Amino acid sequence: MVASSVKADPSWIPHSFVFEEVLKLSQRGLEIHVARFLFHGEEQIGTLYFHDTYKKVDPKVLLDFIKKMRYYSFGSLLRNPKGLYSELLYSKLIYKLIHKIRPTLIHAHFAYPEAWSALLARRHLKIPLVVTLHGYDINILHEYNYGIRRLRAYDHIVRKVLRHADCVIGVSQDLARMAKELGARNVVYLPNGVDTKVFTPELTSGEAELVNNLRRRWNIEDADVVVGFFRHLRPYYGIHYLIPVIRYVVSKTRTKVKFIWAGDGVEPYKTLILNMLKKAGIDQYVSYIGALPRTLMPIVYKTVNIVTNTSLTDGMPPSVLEAMATGRPVISFAVGGNKDIISHGIDGFLVQPGDYKTYSKLLLFLIENPDEVKKLGYNARRKIINFFDSEKRIENLIKIYKVIAKNEK
């Protein structure tokens, strides 16, 4: 498994979906070795092994570059030398692992740098390469400088990865379609999953006390309805659209409603957004609680009644799957995998990207109709159990592995 930033830590949020996947695969009896572009050292959980790059500076990388030059086009070399060095250093780790453990196949999460570094490492060896696309590696949002492919050099690399991969997995139907358009030969749609035994609407007595404590800490204990946003404060996640939404809602309803925003933020965007809240006179309705440990999230969703998602580009967002598994309806912009997950008016609402006026009216409708919240939340939970449970994804992934491995014999 090639996953550059995954950590052997259930509380670590970035790429947590990869950690949970490799852990479940190992629990199914597979021996999994994860190649990371980190410098922590070796780690092991049962038959799950984590391997890091050995050193940050390696003069022999230049020799590796000479051997691998034929894999690069002239255009793909015209970019930041640091990125070029990093992918060669990463590929060296993968190359050593290939010769050490002799894997049945290589599975890379993200086309770049993971799959590209794996492709450089595999070279002439007949080891199948499976690539999972998640969004940033293929989607483009020029106005927010989002997506690796907006730069021509990386676009060439991603296209080459897709052409040479033995199987490309798109976690949304949009990603699967785009992979085919960019030249992938064997494309499979396999959505992300969520553990429906961990993310559940049921509330034990111990959890109820914790929920109450969190609501007091976040100053939302007196609200009749709490609305959550669980994406990072970054421009392409579109939280700026929530400011006119909140202003509209609080001016139209007599229901006491409050909002919590959870996620890390990048500057200067985070400060800009928080200042916009104050300028709009609605900051008293919003509690920004920052990043939370991954292990707390099953409880966090239970502190809210409704979940909002204003991302302007998406693969298959785990936060939407988790909210729906917890029985919370989601109002989302209709982008990426959200269109696969949410059935409009049945288990949530879909709104055209940027249409904050329609978004405002739908949110107000839910705030003032608690029975509708319960109905949509119930349907959302059933949808996730039937189609997006993580155990189903693991079963289907193992089937893909078996087919790919069989075809290479």
Image: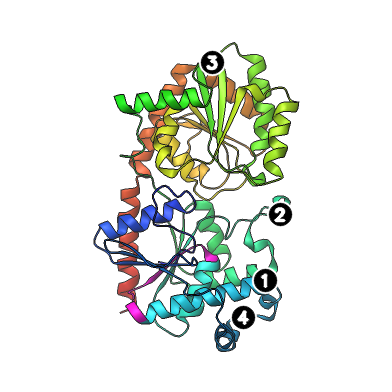
Residue 25: image x %, image y %? 31, 59
**Among the 4 quarters of the image, the one containing residue 128:** bottom left
Q: Which residue carries the number 1 mark?
A: 153
Give above or below for 77 relative to 8: below
C-alpha span from label 1 to label 4: 10 Å
How crowded pointer 4 is (Cα within 10 Å; few <14, some 14-19, many 20+) is rated as: some
Residue projecting furthest to the right: 279
Quick one: SS at disc 4?
Answer: loop
Q: Which residue carries the number 4 mark?
A: 72
Whether the residues at callouts 2 and 3 have beta carbons within 8 Å, the answer is no
- The residue segment tinted magenta is 100-112
Give the mark nearest the N terminus, 2 or 3.
2
Give the mark nearest the N terminus, 4 or 2.
4
The answer to whether residue 320 is seen in the rendering is yes
User: What is the three-letter code of the residue carrying label 3?
Assistant: Glu
Residue 171: image x %, image y %? 46, 54
Residue at (69% x, 36% y) in the render? 273
Residue at (49% x, 19% y) in the render? 221
C-alpha span from label 2 to label 3: 37 Å
User: What is the three-letter code of the residue carrying label 4?
Assistant: Tyr
Residue projecting furthest to the left: 29
Q: Is residue 349 magenta?
A: no
Which circle marks residue 142 in the picture? 2
C-alpha span from label 2 to label 1: 15 Å
Residue at (57% x, 26% y) in the render? 259
User: What is the three-letter code of the residue carrying label 1?
Assistant: Ala
